[in-house]
Amino acid sequence: MIVKDISMKSDVIIAGSGIAASACALRLASAGFHPFLLTRDLEMAAGVEAIGEYCWPLIQDLGLWSAL
């Protein structure tokens, strides 16, 4: 595990770095928390992560729709 800034203070640790963990971290950060995403992999897995249509309202709510 690589920790870039050991002095960083986090309120919440989220295990994972996929779309669900990232959305959770964004939501927590917008609520004033300081989340820390913890993953065991240093690189993205090959392939594409599918985002189901049921996730579109969350993506819009997080302000990420234009990035797609």
Image: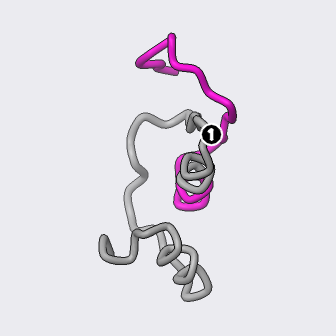
Q: Position of residue 37 (x, y in %)?
A: 56, 38
Q: What is the total number of numbered labels drawn onto the structure image?
A: 1
Residue type of the residue flagged with mark 1: Phe
Q: Position of residue 56 (x, y in %)?
A: 52, 83
The quadrant in which the C terminus is found is: bottom left
Pointer 1: what residue?
33
- Taking the magenta stretch, the answer to whether it contains residue 20 is yes
61, above or below 20, in the image: below
Please tell me in which quadrant of the rendered image residue 15 appears.
top right
24, above or below 32, in the image: below
Instruction: Name the residue at 52% across, 21% down.
Output: 1
Outermost residue on the left side: it is 67
Q: Position of residue 35 (x, y in %)?
A: 59, 38
Outermost residue on the bottom side: it is 53
Outermost residue on the front side: it is 32
4, above or below 51, in the image: above
Coloring applied to the structure: one colour
34, above or below 48, in the image: above
Is disc 1 placed on a helix, strand or loop? loop
Instruction: Name the residue at 55% across, 88% down.
Output: 53
Instruction: Name the residue at 59% across, 56% down.
Output: 27
- Magenta extent: 1-24
- Taking the magenta stretch, the answer to whether it contains residue 13 is yes
Count residues near mark 1 (Cα–Cα under 10 Å), then give few for <14, some for 14-19, many for 20+: some
Q: Position of residue 20 (x, y in %)?
A: 60, 60
Instruction: Name the residue at 40% across, 48% down.
Output: 44
Q: In front here: 63 or 52?
A: 63
